[in-house]
Image (cartoon, rainbow, N blue to C red):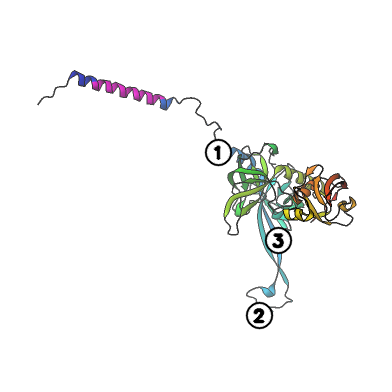
Amino acid sequence: MKKHYSTRFLLNWALLGLALGGLLILFNTLDFNPLPGTKSPIGEKPDSYADAVDKAAPSVVSIMSFYRSEKNSALLPFTPSHERSSKSPTQFKIRPNRGSGVIINEKGYIVTNHHVVAGADKIEVTLHDGRKLEAKILGLDADSDLAVITTKLNKLPALPIADGKQIHTGDIVLAIGNPFGIGQTVTQGIISATGRDRIGLNTYENFIQTDAAINPGNSGGALINTRGEMLGINSAVYNSHSGNYFGISFAIPSELVLDVVKQIIEHGEVIRGWLGVEGVDLNAQMLKRIGLSNIQGVLITDVFDRGPAEMAGIRVGDILTHINKKIIRDTRDVLNAVAAGKPGDQITIMGIRERQSFVTRAILEKRPGR
């Protein structure tokens, strides 16, 4: 049977076709002509940090420290019983320790961690281009966990230093080092916090905290920004006794690094002020026992004979509350305030003795080495 189509039916199909055609034109316009102003308000993340790595990597070296440990042949396995004797000759076993370092200036000085090279009998540095050089220790600073070593070469690529005042929580950072001795490796993270202290790792602490992966062998390597500038020296990672990694790593900020390096190059050591006291942090029980409240400070428990504090009249039982008008909250504040000075500097100390305020002045001496 022959079908007949009404005019209205054909018209409806024609209108539908026009509508579909219009939608196709609209979609094509949207696909090929995106609207302006669609960028993220916080900026776009670059696809690669290769330029930063290329700039910084030649300044990061691998370090192998060798230690000789004595071993008596009488204790060696496989030694025949008739040869075992306490008079057997002493032999030496070479024990290696891996780490990283950063070329800090054009004269070839290399900064690394104290715990990477301290006590080493031999130090070998591997440059980015594969050359191996023997290095010597120029100076050590256990209190900041930093060290400076040198090689015979003096024209090495120094790593540019970032402005320490431009470091912000949330900034992207890259860690460069030699984890587990597998070769130079780059990991990425962000700055999790700045000014971290009271961690209990070093005597003087002002760490940059990051979640960039840092592993054994990374110690002494560089923490850089996305412009390839050094922010700090990677130093430690927080983990549990189980060895689990929690994404918490610490780097020594470049400002502290430069101060230590400068003093080691000039003096062979870091010279800090010393007051000659020992103390404990105040707590609620102590305050109640001595009849005080709402006081921050440090209770002095020992005063070194003929030291700066004794010469200034400070006694056991005194509470130090201010040094150079800065509030003292705990023993670390005392340590940092005194270390900021140099031998011969005069500091003003405020405190409480037998519930009465006092003010005195002390002349700092050189902090004894350790």
- Residue 74 is situated, as x and y percent measured from the top left of the image, at 69, 75
Report which residue position mark 1 lands on.
Answer: 48
Which element is circle 3 on? strand
In primary-sequence order, the first of circles 3 and 1 is 1
Label 3 – label 2 distance at C-alpha: 29 Å
In primary-sequence order, the first of circles 3 and 2 is 3
For the residue marked with disc 1, what is the amino acid? Ser
For the residue marked with disc 3, what is the amino acid? Tyr
Name the residue nearer the viewer: 195 or 157: 195
Q: Main secondary structure of the magenta part?
A: helix
Report which residue position mark 3 lands on.
Answer: 67
Report which residue position mark 2 lands on.
Answer: 81
Question: To which quarter of the image does residue 83 belong?
Answer: bottom right
Which element is circle 2 on? helix
Q: In the figure, 59 relative to 290: above or below?
A: above
- Residue 253 is situated, as x and y percent measured from the top left of the image, at 69, 44
Tell me what residue is drawn at x 67 percent, y 36 percent.
166
Tell me what residue is drawn at x 68 percent, y 51 percent.
199
Label 1 – label 2 distance at C-alpha: 63 Å
Question: To which quarter of the image does residue 82 belong?
Answer: bottom right
Name the residue nearer the viewer: 140 or 85: 140
Q: Which residues are magenta?
A: 12-29
Name the residue nearer the viewer: 131 or 193: 193
Residue 370 inside the magenta-drawn segment: no
- Residue 173 is situated, as x and y percent measured from the top left of the image, at 61, 42
Mark 1 against mark 2, which lies toward the viewer? 1
Which element is circle 1 on? loop
Tell me what residue is drawn at x 86 percent, y 54 percent.
315
For the residue marked with disc 2, what is the amino acid? Ser
